Image (spheres, rainbow, N blue to C red):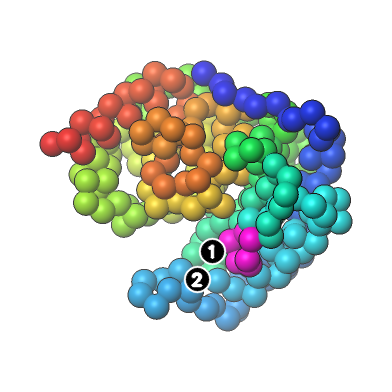
């Protein structure tokens, strides 16, 4: 079941689309130009590893400039720089390189994420993987997937059972405590599990190649831009308790309502044991 949200009155789909594309265009030189080069990598955490590079910071700056040039009064929430507050109901959500670990390893499953929320709900989103030339763009409940500028059909699969589901999570280490027990049970029941795909997994779901993505510990910038893409493709994405996923946390995206319900049941029952 799709839960698409149309763009609010007073802000046209065309204006949103142009801004998303302008942001992606602005980021591309910073990201693609540095991909598979010997970059300096900083660690944002004193314990653990959360990498950031000059490409992340510069790309977000350029995306922010592209947004501010068109909507100077809108809020901006980004991965690398401080939040720009707004008195409007609009916030743009930016992760300039979702999957920096993949980026610094030369693996092309990272992507630039840009989304727009209205009153806290995601209404538009873009994911671009410039190395492969792919873009998923969802505005006004409609999804456009392109490869090197040519349109490619995109819709979720018809898989309804966990035993048939091609499943993904970025890293099993994100699950701890009851969430680890829940993931272990779901992993055992799924057809297969692929790791390390970051935002690319959600877009593969929107294109019918992956059926289920289950994650924990997400930030708003990790998931909000992807929600309109999944929903416009006919999929469903929520938190593990069935709520809206814009703020991140534990998130589950599924191709069909039946698959979503079964996965939710498995997760819930495992956490209660």
**Can residue 144 be seen?**
no
Percent x, y of residue 227: 57, 37
Report if residue 80 lies within the magenta region: yes
Q: Quadrant of residue 121?
A: top right
Q: Nearer the viewer, residue 58 or 188?
A: 58
Q: Residue at coordinates 53% horizontally, 50% vertically from top-left?
A: 220
Q: Provide the residue designation for mark 1.
A: 100
Please indicate whether residue 92 sits to the left or right of residue 233 in the image: right
Where is residue 37, by image quadrant? bottom right
- Provide residue 52's location: percent of width, then percent of height: 55, 71
Q: Is 86 a magenta residue? A: no
Q: CA distance from mark 2 to mark 1?
A: 6 Å
Which disc is residue 139 wearing? none
Residue under circle 2?
51
In which quadrant of the rendered image does the C terminus lie? top left
Q: Are marks 2 and 1 in contact (CB under 8 Å)?
A: yes
As drawn, is 182 to the left or to the right of 71? left
């Amino acid at each position: 079941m799709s839960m698409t949200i149309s763009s609010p009155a007073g802000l046209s789909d065309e204006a949103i689309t142009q801004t998303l594309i302008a942001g992606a265009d602005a980021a591309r030189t910073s990201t693609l130009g540095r991909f598979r080069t010997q970059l300096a990598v900083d660690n944002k955490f004193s314990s653990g590893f959360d990498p950031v590079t000059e490409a992340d910071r510069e790309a977000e700056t350029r995306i922010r400039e592209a947004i501010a040039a068109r909507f100077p009064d809108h809020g901006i929430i980004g991965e690398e720089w401080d939040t720009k507050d707004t008195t409007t109901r609009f916030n743009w959500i930016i992760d300039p390189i979702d999957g920096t670990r993949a980026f610094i390893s030369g693996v092309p499953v990272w992507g630039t994420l840009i989304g727009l929320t209205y009153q806290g709900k995601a209404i538009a989103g873009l994911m671009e993987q410039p190395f492969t030339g792919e873009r998923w763009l969802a505005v006004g409940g409609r999804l456009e997937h392109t490869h090197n500028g040519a349109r490619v059909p995109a819709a979720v699969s018809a898989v309804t059972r966990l035993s048939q589901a091609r499943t993904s999570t970025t890293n099993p280490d994100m699950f701890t405590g009851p969430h680890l027990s829940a993931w272990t049970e779901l992993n055992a029941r799924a057809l297969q599990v692929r790791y390390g795909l970051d935002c690319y997994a959600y877009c593969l779901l929107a294109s019918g190649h992956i059926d289920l993505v289950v994650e924990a510990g997400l930030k708003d910038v990790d998931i909000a831009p992807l929600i309109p893409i999944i929903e416009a493709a006919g999929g469903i994405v929520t938190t593990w308790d069935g709520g809206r996923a814009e703020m991140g946390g534990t998130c589950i995206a599924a191709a069909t309502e039946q698959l979503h319900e079964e996965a939710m049941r498995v997760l819930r029952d495992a956490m209660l044991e």
